[in-house]
Image (spheres, grey):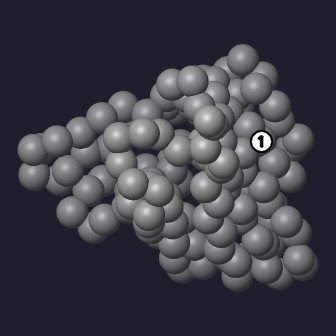
Amino acid sequence: MKNSKITVQATVEANAKKVWNYYNSPNHITNWNFADPSWHCPKAENDMKIGGTYKARMEAKDGSFGFDFEAIYTDIKEGQEFTYEFGGRTATVQFDDNGNKTEVIVSFDPETENSIEMQKGGWQAILNNFKNYTENN
């Protein structure tokens, strides 16, 4: 039986164009793409086209652990949503424009190593970090 998707969301106090840009530009991704202050994202690349690759390095600041996240875009609706595939799983990110606020909704296939709660908490923490960074920069 295939697990249903996990969904996290946040309302960002910024217009959709800024939110899309901050979510997808490598110079911004490196500033928010981590779940905990003891981690960072030292590098990111984003070739945002169907078949293009998204890459981000996530690692503990003390160097004790790290991993590369890599995904391939399968669908893009510019400024509205995109879907990518990573490790046999998919994720879709939607940007719902509400004027000076943007709802960001991320739905992804869970993996089997960690609990649903842990996965949801990690992805929500990253999204919350994104919200804080975008609203304050």
Q: x, y percentage for residue 95?
A: 79, 60
**Which residue is located at x 51 percent, y 25 percent?**
87
**Which residue is located at x 42 percent, y 39 percent?**
112
Q: Is residue 5 above or below residue 66?
A: below
Rendering quarter of residue 136: bottom right
In depth, the one of 79 and 113 nearer the eye is 113
Q: x, y percentage for residue 5?
A: 65, 49
Instruction: Determine whether, in the image, residue 108 is placed left or right of residue 128.
Output: right
**Which residue is located at x 63 percent, y 28 percent?**
85
The single residue placed furthest to the top in the displayed view is 51
- Residue beneath disc 1: 82
**Which residue is located at x 60 percent, y 78 percent?**
135
Q: x, y percentage for residue 21?
A: 70, 54
In depth, the one of 136 and 79 nearer the eye is 79
Instruction: Give the number of marks.
Output: 1
Instruction: Determine whether, in the image, residue 108 is placed left or right of residue 50.
Output: left
The single residue placed furthest to the front in the displayed view is 1
Rendering quarter of residue 66: top left
Q: x, y percentage for residue 14?
A: 73, 76
The quarter of the image holding the C terminus is bottom right
Which residue type carries mark 1?
Phe
Q: Is residue 10 above or below residue 42?
A: below
Q: Is residue 54 above or below residue 33?
A: above
The quarter of the image holding the N terminus is top right
| Residue 24 in sight from this viewpoint | no
* Residue density around tag 1, few if under 14, some if 14–19, many if 20 or more, within 10 Å: many
Instruction: Determine whether, in the image, residue 113 is placed left or right of residue 126.
Output: left
- Give the SS element for disc 1: strand
| Residue 81 in sight from this viewpoint | yes
